[in-house]
Amino acid sequence: MKILLLFLCAALLTPAHAIVPDTIILNAGKNSKVIFYGKSAQDLKNLEMLDLNKIIRELNQRQNGADTISRQLVKLDEKGYLNPSLGDPKISWKQKYMANTYLNLYVGRGNDHGRYIFFQPPPALLNHQTAKLTSEIIMQNKLSTSLAVVHDIIIADGTKYTFGLRYGLGVGFNLNRYVHWTLLQSVGSAEVVEIAQRSQNLIKNEKIEALQSDFSAFQSYFQIAPKLSIKNLKGQTTFFLSAGARLNYDRFFENVNPAAYSSGMSINSTRGVITTSHGPVISGGRYSAYSEKNSVGLSYMAEVGYKWIGIFVNLYPENVILTTRLMDKTDRPESGFVKDKKGKIGYISFGIKLGR
């Protein structure tokens, strides 16, 4: 029990300006007062569990046997002082667990982390010594939302801080986008126009075409992170800082090639053709880059805030796995395409966190 002191004083006059919010003064007659002082409001609330009648009787007995004692100091840390009508306040493990269990909501968005090079011809195909032409894919995070149930294991609980380990489970829904870039680099200003035209002709001849952009992902994860919280004078946690990792499982639902809809026939249906094909993200030169339907990987997150509101950052460096596949039996190793090439792209998102 966290009650610090219980003073039972006779003929003790206390100035009005000495009263603080966590002090209770009871007038016990004209010349006597009973003062209850606690470090926090919760300490005073714990007085409800005490048998005050028993305390007063025992103090009176001590007073009668000690003529020279005018003031007594008692520490209330013995079960004998508990109110018998309340019983022993045993708290179940479920109550203890739920007391440090919270529901958190995350909403944010972000941008790319990492690139996947689908096409990079050698400079000789552009008839230039240093020209670098690439067809690349990056990923943007248009919307990131998740809901998590987390629990705090308190490791150190001081008067000014609390340090613990937070873990929990979450589910989320993300809206992502493939962004396709064609970049020309390492070309002098005097040759830009000429090399740019050669690059455009090469891309046209290889029939490089971006096929997918937006896609969605259903996400589930397990997270674990140390957490440091600062306490105010009343013992309440205020500012907090947390950083850790998540183990994620994502299920992707991509936009298919529009040609898959136009080439199908709908029979006796007003909804049109519904296709579930998992088409390529980009194609060209008889090669295509496909993404995996599922992804398992680590992300890294950090949170900072005040009480129930804060901001978060989540780095997911390897969210999507892309693989370049050969569409026929003729491989062209010097063309700029790489058969069976694998690469991972991800994102970093920022947003608002609501919850303790």
Image (spheres, rainbow, N blue to C red):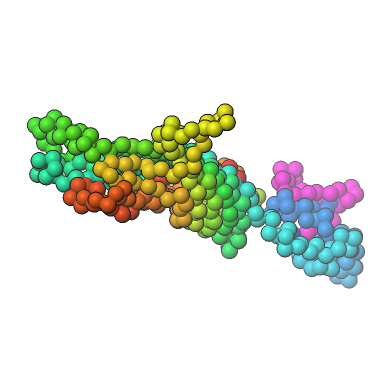
Asked if 156 appears above or below 11 in the picture, the reply is below
Q: Is residue 199 visible?
A: yes
Q: Is residue 13 visible?
A: no
- Which residue does the image show at 70% across and 60% down from the upper left? 96
Image spot of residue 8 (x, y percent)? 82, 58
Q: Is residue 323 left or right of residue 200?
A: right
Image spot of residue 121 (x, y percent)? 19, 45
Is 16 inside the magenta-drawn segment?
A: yes
Most foreground residue, 220 or 198: 198
Image spot of residue 67 (x, y percent)? 87, 68
Q: Residue furthest front?
A: 267
Q: Which residues are magenta?
A: 6-32
Quarter where residue 61 is shown:
bottom right
- Which residue does the image show at 76% across and 62% down from the upper left? 91
Most foreground residue, 169 or 228: 169
Most foreground residue, 301 or 193: 193
- Which residue does the image show at 20% across and 33% down from the upper left? 200
- Which residue does the image show at 23% across and 34% down from the upper left? 204
Asked if 25 appears above or below 267 in the picture, the reply is below
Q: Is residue 281 left or right of residue 108?
A: left
Is 216 inside the magenta-drawn segment?
A: no
Asked if 326 appears above or below 141 in the picture, the reply is below
Number of dots carrying numbers: 0
Image spot of residue 337 (x, y percent)? 24, 48
Q: Quadrant of the N terminus?
A: bottom right
